[in-house]
Image (cartoon, rainbow, N blue to C red):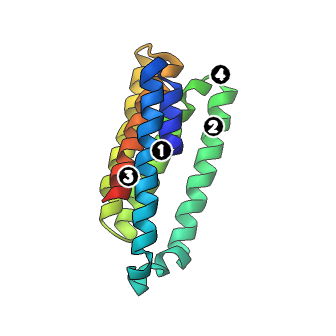
Amino acid sequence: MAWALWAASGLSGVLSVAVRIVAIAVAALILVRSARLRGTAAADAMPMFTSRAYRLVVLAEVVSLLGGAELLNAIGHPVYVPAWFATVVGAHLVVFGRLFHRSFSWLGAAILVGGVAGAVVGLAGGGTDGIEATSGLIAATSLLAGGGW
């Protein structure tokens, strides 16, 4: 949901409103479906969240997100923070795919592509709006599609 809102901030007018409305509607549907499926979840699904590997990957992700954002701000390129965030989140999901379940790999790769695409748009002169829209839309679409799957 947050990725869609980030993407919408890089858009204007009707398109921005449309992205917000669609994202809210899809997220609501996913939440309702998740609530219904919660009782049927596999009993072995929780060990991932309590494993040492999970905690280490998430720690590395948080340090990378915050450290990269600080570095980008310090060197005068804060417009690339959305692309950096998408790249890091995508990379951490690719690692989850190797450690826990293959489905994370596809989701991670898609989000990682969003991060790289946003950086390319920025380097090509797309500015803040282009970076936010590109990285945010690809990440949001990937996450909402993955959540709905």
- Which residue appears at 41% of the width and 60% of the height? 95
Question: How far apart in space, not on screen, are marks 2 and 4 (Cα)?
Answer: 11 Å
- Which residue appears at 47% of the width and 76% of the height? 48
Question: How far apart in space, not on screen, are marks 1 and 3 (Cα)?
Answer: 22 Å
Badge 1 amino acid: Ile
Question: How far apart in space, not on screen, are marks 2 and 1 (Cα)?
Answer: 27 Å
Dot 4 corresponds to which residue?
76
Dot 2 corresponds to which residue?
69
Question: How far apart in space, not on screen, are marks 3 and 2 (Cα)?
Answer: 20 Å
Residue 1 place in picture, x, y as percent: 50, 46
- Whichever of labels 4 and 3 marks the residue nearer the N terminus, that label is 4
Q: Residues within 10 Å of mark 1 (few under 14, many from 20)?
A: some
Looking at the rendered structure, the secondary structure element under dot 4 is: loop
Dot 1 corresponds to which residue?
24
- Whichever of labels 3 and 2 marks the residue nearer the N terminus, that label is 2
- Whichever of labels 2 and 4 marks the residue nearer the N terminus, that label is 2
